[in-house]
Image: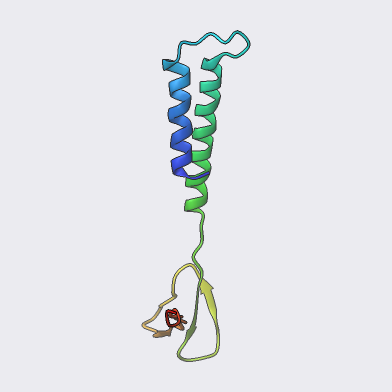
Amino acid sequence: MGIGGSIFLIALGAIFAFAVEADLGWLNLAVVGWVLMLAGVAGLLATVYFWNSRRRTVVAAPVRGDRVAADRVVPIQDDQVMREYREVRRPGRPI
């Protein structure tokens, strides 16, 4: 959902729950507002959880040896120099 969508649901739910004084008979807008606020909070918590649990894997091969390490960061230990491979693609010529 994203942070923006979650904040929007929380704000819309607060408007329905606290600011709107309409009587629709079959629909209680205060309950709709609380449900929207809870959905927004749940979406916000899920977004924060997934953003924090994201892993960035970097594959690096040491200069000495043929091992490949896949960790969250480039492993540099005991003053060992690591070689990094990057592929950069530039856009073609404009037409």
Q: Nearer the viewer, residue 18 or 22?
A: 22
Q: Nearer the viewer, residue 49 or 67?
A: 49
The residue at the point 49 percent across, 34 percent down is: 41
Residue ranking furthest to the left: 79
Q: Quadrant of residue 78?
A: bottom left
The residue at the point 55 percent across, 25 percent down is: 35
Q: Nearer the viewer, residue 80 or 8?
A: 8
Q: Position of residue 55 (x, y in %)?
A: 51, 61
In the depicted structure, whether residue 70 falls above or below residue 45: below
In the depicted structure, whether residue 81 falls above or below residue 31: below
Residue ranking furthest to the bottom: 64
The residue at the point 51 percent across, 69 percent down is: 57
In the depicted structure, whether residue 83 falls above or below residue 37: below
The residue at the point 44 percent across, 70 percent down is: 73
Q: Position of residue 74 (x, y in %)?
A: 44, 74
> Total label count?
0
Colour style of the rendered protein structure: rainbow
Q: Nearer the viewer, residue 21 or 77?
A: 21
Q: Quadrant of residue 25?
A: top right
Q: Position of residue 82 (x, y in %)?
A: 42, 84
Residue ranking furthest to the front: 95
Which quarter of the figure is the C terminus placed in? bottom left
Q: Position of residue 26 (x, y in %)?
A: 63, 11
In the depicted structure, whether residue 71 falls above or below residue 90: above
Left or right of residue 19: residue 55: right
Left or right of residue 69: residue 19: left
Left or right of residue 36: residue 7: left
